[in-house]
Amino acid sequence: MPEISQEWTTELKKGSVQLCLLALVAKDQKYGFQIVKELRELSDGFFDLKEGTLYPALRRLEERGFVESHWVEPETGVPRKYYRITERGRRALAEAIGVWDRMAAGTRRVLETGR
Amino acid sequence: MTGIDVYLAQVQRRLAGMDPKVQLDILRELRSHLGDSATANGGNETAAIAGVGDPVSVAKRYLELYGYGRLYRALFAILAGILGYFTVPALVAGNEGIFPLFFSAAFLALAFVFLIWVSVRAGNQVGLIAGGAALVGRVGGLAGAVAVNPDSSFVTAEGLALFVLVSLLLVLVGWIPGKARQTWRRPSMDL
């Protein structure tokens, strides 16, 4: 039985999932299932969230103008909605990574004292 | 009908009121995802559906993001206006019998409950518009009452003051619950 609450871990994930989603579409456009899969694999399963929470998170980024989407309908196979980062999203990503790096470095230094 | 069809129909039912274009786009994307996920799971649709989550929570997240569409917002305002119209006789009836008084008082109670519901479910802006529509409905009701009874001596200064007060209260009731919900809900984790 873990000592820390499940809610704490959930909040950590919630606070960082949009940053990860934005980073995942920063280089190439990607569709939902691909994003979900990469997020899970690259995070070693940490972001093993319900896919039903990831899609609204992606759409929130779209509402903020950080990503844009379009449908691709192949001649064979399923139509897919692709997401790609916008210029505004790129600026937001750089800014958020800066905050994240400062937080991670600061937290690490503090945590070292308690090991 | 496949398991995915049933699941999407459940989500769609719970997205009722949302802009139809957005609704279709959401369902299309979910279908595309479920298709990919089922293929990755060796054709197991149940596993794919379980990965997305229960339809109630899924639809709720989308509704929180997009809210109600224009049609429903207009419908809320129209209903509030109609309710507002029928709230007037209770305040201007004066020497009328008990039935119209009771009738319009019931409408007033109904209008308050309806506006609180709209404000909480659809947000304070939609609630404010509905409250405004209720006010317009009341003004229409008053104008109708005066037109029907040219001898409008029953419209006293106190009655008019009460009319204005209750009308403004309806607008506030449309706005405050939604605003309170927005203020007190958990902070957003959006970037």
Image (cartoon, rainbow, N blue to C red):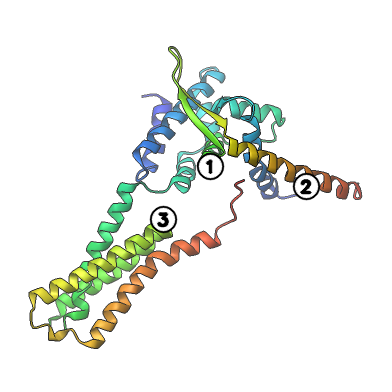
Amino acid type, mark 1: Arg
Measured from the top left, where is residue B23 in percent x and y? 39, 37
Query: From this viewpoint, which residue is outermost toward the top?
Result: A76
Measured from the top left, where is residue B70 in percent x and y? 33, 48
Per the model, the C-alpha gap separating discs 2 and 3 is 37 Å
Q: Nearer the viewer, residue A65 or A78?
A: A65
Which SS class for mark 2? Answer: helix
**Residue assigned mark 2:** A103
Q: Badge 1, how many Cα within 10 Å: few under 14, some, many 20+?
A: some
Amino acid type, mark 2: Met
**Residue assigned mark 3:** B121
Which quadrant, please, contains the C terminus of chain B? top right
Q: Which mark is residue A60?
A: 1
Residue A114 is left or right of residue A69, and the answer is right
Q: Which mark is residue A82?
A: none
Which SS class for mark 3? Answer: helix
